[in-house]
Image: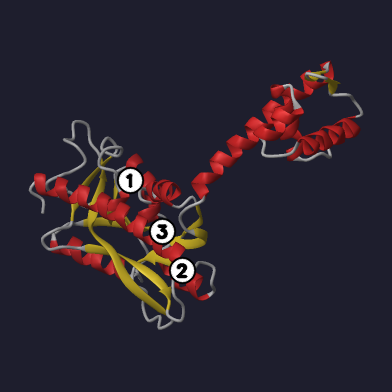
């Protein structure tokens, strides 16, 4: 049998049970004695049981009322808990954001951004789409994403860009036994096997210029457009790669990777906000960007402190 009463029926029943009086229950719940009597009769009719014996001094609960009371207390407690939990959603922005992001940010920056955003604005729902930078313009123009974070697109008049954070590119190698932390003071003298993004990208061109400026010899190359697959390859073999400093965690990755930053002359990777020229960002998108930029800048600054301490900047 499904319950067809109301929450008010339950609250007034509990009050009457605890106060042992319809009049006292009415005062407690800002109701009237006749109102309490009406709700109790309604409950008794719905459940087809007698809940109270009416006496001159008040009311006496029946065994059926004893059972119902225990269940009703559990119900009211769960409702109050749910109500209290809803208070965290009462402030902040509300809405849905879909953002395309390059893997340079998804590995280390997206998770703390989402956690922080959930604290500040729990009603903002974020859908993260990880992809390579060359796919972002197409995803934007087709409205697959609301905005994107990556590198500056080439020849895309329908897209405008603004800088968020700029970080140095770094040569990433497998850490060797006894290596003093994640930094190395100079690149290896031996020719390197490099896994890099596709040749047509602007980022690839600046990486190759940085390699040439440092006199790094390249033995062979392999094209991999997945940063996570590239890092897995580097961590398992003698292959190397070049990635923005944000991709590597200076603590968690210290035992697996060693990095050499491309500074003086600088080879920098600017991470840009990409949006459709004909549209503006929602307030929810702006809030997400604010939190993500702060997290990315914090991670970038932590690396710059390490570079300075090692005399690499």
What residue is disc 1 on?
Answer: 234
Q: Residues within 10 Å of mark 1 (few under 14, many from 20)?
A: many
- How many labels were placed on the picture? 3
| Above/below status of 242 relative to 13 | below
Label 1 vs 3, first from the N-terminus:
1
**Where, quadrant-wise, is the C terminus in this rendering?**
bottom left
Q: Distance between the residues labelled 1 and 3?
A: 32 Å
Q: Is residue 276 left or right of residue 234?
A: right
Judge whether 71 appears above or below 230 on screen: above
Secondary structure under the numbered disc 3 in the rendered image: helix
Distance Cα–Cα, label 2 vs label 1: 40 Å
| Residue with the most extreme left position | 311
Q: Looking at the image, can residue 196 be seen? A: no
Label 1: which secondary element: helix
Determine the residue positioned at 30% across, 55% down: 294
Residue at the spot 78% in from the left edge and 24% down from the top edge: 68
> In which image quadrant can residue 201 be found?
bottom left
The first of marks 2 and 1 along the sequence is 1
Q: Is residue 241 above or below residue 310?
A: below
| Alpha-carbon span between mark 3 and mark 2 | 10 Å
Which residue is label 2 attached to?
Answer: 282
| Residue 272 screen position, x and y as percent | 33, 67
Q: Residue furthest front?
A: 56
- Dot 3: few (<14), some (14–19), or many (≥20) neighbours within 10 Å? many
Q: Determine the residue located farthest toward the top in the rendered image.
A: 63
């Amino acid at each position: 049998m499904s319950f067809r009463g109301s929450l008010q029926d339950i609250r007034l029943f509990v009050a009457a049970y605890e106060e042992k009086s319809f009049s006292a229950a009415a005062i407690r719940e800002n109701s009237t004695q006749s109102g309490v009597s009406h709700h109790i009769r309604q409950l008794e009719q719905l459940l087809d049981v007698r809940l109270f014996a009416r006496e001159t001094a008040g009311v006496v609960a029946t065994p059926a009322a004893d059972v119902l009371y225990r269940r009703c207390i559990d119900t009211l407690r769960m409702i109050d808990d749910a109500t209290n939990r809803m208070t965290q959603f009462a402030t902040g922005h509300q809405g849905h954001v879909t953002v395309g992001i390059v893997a340079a940010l998804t590995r280390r920056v997206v998770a703390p951004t989402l956690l922080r955003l959930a604290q500040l604005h729990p009603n903002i729902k974020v859908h993260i789409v990880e992809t390579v930078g060359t796919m972002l313009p197409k995803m934007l123009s087709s409205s697959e994403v609301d905005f994107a974070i990556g590198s500056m697109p080439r020849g895309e008049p329908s897209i405008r860009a603004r800088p968020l954070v700029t970080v140095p590119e770094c040569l990433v190698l497998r850490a060797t036994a006894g290596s003093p932390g994640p930094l190395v003071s100079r690149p290896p003298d031996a020719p390197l096997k490099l896994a890099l993004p596709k040749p047509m990208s602007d980022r690839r061109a600046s990486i190759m210029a940085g390699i040439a400026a440092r006199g790094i010899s390249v033995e062979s190359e392999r094209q991999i457009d997945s940063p996570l697959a590239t890092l897995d390859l580097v961590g398992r073999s003698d292959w190397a790669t070049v990635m923005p400093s944000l991709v590597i965690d200076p603590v968690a990755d210290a035992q697996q990777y060693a990095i050499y930053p491309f500074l003086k002359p600088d080879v920098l990777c600017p991470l840009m906000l990409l949006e459709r020229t004909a549209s503006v960002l929602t307030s929810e998108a702006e809030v997400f960007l604010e939190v993500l930029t702060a997290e990315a800048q914090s991670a970038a600054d932590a690396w710059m402190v390490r570079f300075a301490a090692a005399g690499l900047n």
